[in-house]
């Protein structure tokens, strides 16, 4: 799966939110979108998964214009794991996961044995194979996000879109979700709030600030102390392991000075 965005702009009223985003995601690449709160990360991703429509510019999926695809066609190509998932009804875990089969079904077509097999395999992938009869609303935040990831996996798409899916989770569940996604060998685009998480999992980063792309490169190339200060206004120390090149970013609060 490849995604190409060219000069994507969004206006809400007279306010320009995205100011001409150019973006490329290559097949099997894991790209993180970083930037301060309100920079336009989630807005751009919402354009990719069609919650919002660009005012100007275009987005291509595998060389096809996104707005020329039906919603079903695009749902067969990419699946979404978002930050918040609210349900007003009491669904079981298995019922939630089976929702991911909807793009593969005709109107009013019932779930069949294959659908149940795919859903149960997805639950096994996220480590929740014993949870299928549990009520979704009774689960912890981390468990709910793994269920939503399982739902995305049942769509059997080439690409996953992660819209800040771990922001409200503790570190155990953040790593759990990201480890699972990294192991899938899919094309992934993710808005990520935590720079250390971004450095650990992403092949490449795209930095957005005030609706514009202001940086692009591998985590090692992009995440310098100067860049972090310029973007976030925070002093930091970027440490790299000599043998592996792995990064660790330590933030330096004002009261340490």
Image (tube, rainbow, N blue to C red):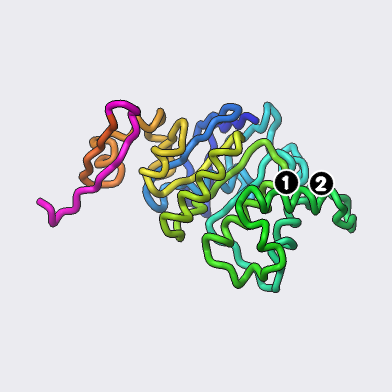
Picture quadrant where residue 226 is located: top left
Q: Is residue 250 above or below residue 146?
A: above
Q: Which percent across, then down, holds residue 31?
A: 50, 35
Going 73% across and 53% down the picture, which residue do you hit?
A: 120
Residue 22 lies left or right of residue 226; in this view the side is: right
Going 59% across and 62% down the picture, which residue do you hit?
A: 85
Circle 1 crowding by C-alpha within 10 Å: few under 14, some 14–19, many from 20: many
Pick whichever, 27 or 206, lies toward us: 27
Instruction: Report which residue position mark 2 lands on.
Output: 104
Pick whichever, 257 or 138, lies toward us: 138
Picture quadrant where residue 248 is located: top left
Q: Which percent across, then down, holds residue 111?
A: 85, 56
Picture disc at residue 106: none
Going 42% across and 59% down the picture, which residue do you hit?
A: 170
How far apart in space, not on screen, are marks 2 and 1 (Cα)? 8 Å
Report if residue 152 lies within the magenta region.
no
Q: Considering only order in the chain, which callout, 1 or 2, is on the residue closer to the N terminus?
A: 2
Report if residue 245 lies within the magenta region.
yes
Pick whichever, 132 or 225, lies toward us: 132
- Name the quadrant of the N terminus: top right
Circle 2 crowding by C-alpha within 10 Å: few under 14, some 14–19, many from 20: some
The reply to whether the C-beta atoms of the residues labelled 2 and 1 are less than 8 Å apart is yes
Q: Which residues are magenta?
A: 242-257
Going 88% across and 57% down the picture, which residue do you hit?
A: 110
Q: Which percent across, then down, holds residue 255?
A: 13, 57
């Amino acid at each position: 799966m490849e995604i190409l965005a060219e000069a994507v702009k969004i206006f809400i009223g007279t306010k320009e939110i995205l100011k001409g985003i150019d973006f490329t995601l290559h097949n099997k690449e894991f790209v993180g979108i970083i930037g301060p709160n309100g920079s336009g990360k989630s807005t751009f991703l919402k354009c990719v998964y069609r919650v919002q429509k660009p005012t100007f510019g275009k987005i291509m999926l595998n060389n096809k214009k996104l707005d020329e695809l039906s919603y079903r066609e695009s749902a067969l190509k990419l699946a979404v794991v978002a930050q918040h998932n609210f349900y007003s009804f009491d669904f079981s875990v298995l019922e939630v996961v089976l929702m991911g089969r909807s793009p593969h079904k005709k109107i009013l077509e019932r779930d069949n044995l294959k659908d149940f097999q795919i859903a149960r395999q997805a639950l096994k992938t996220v480590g929740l194979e014993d949870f299928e009869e549990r009520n979704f609303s009774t689960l912890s935040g981390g468990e709910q996000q793994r269920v939503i990831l399982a739902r995305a996996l049942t769509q059997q798409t080439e690409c996953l879109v992660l819209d800040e899916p771990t922001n409200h989770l503790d570190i155990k569940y953040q790593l759990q979700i990201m480890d699972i996604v990294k192991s899938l060998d899919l094309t992934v685009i993710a808005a990520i709030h935590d720079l250390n998480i971004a450095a650990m999992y992403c092949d490449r980063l795209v930095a957005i600030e005030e609706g514009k792309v202001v940086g692009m490169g591998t985590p090692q190339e992009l995440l310098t102390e100067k860049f972090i200060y310029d973007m976030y206004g925070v002093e930091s120390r970027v440490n790299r392991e000599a043998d592996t090149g792995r990064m660790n970013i330590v933030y330096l609060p004002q009261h340490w000075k």
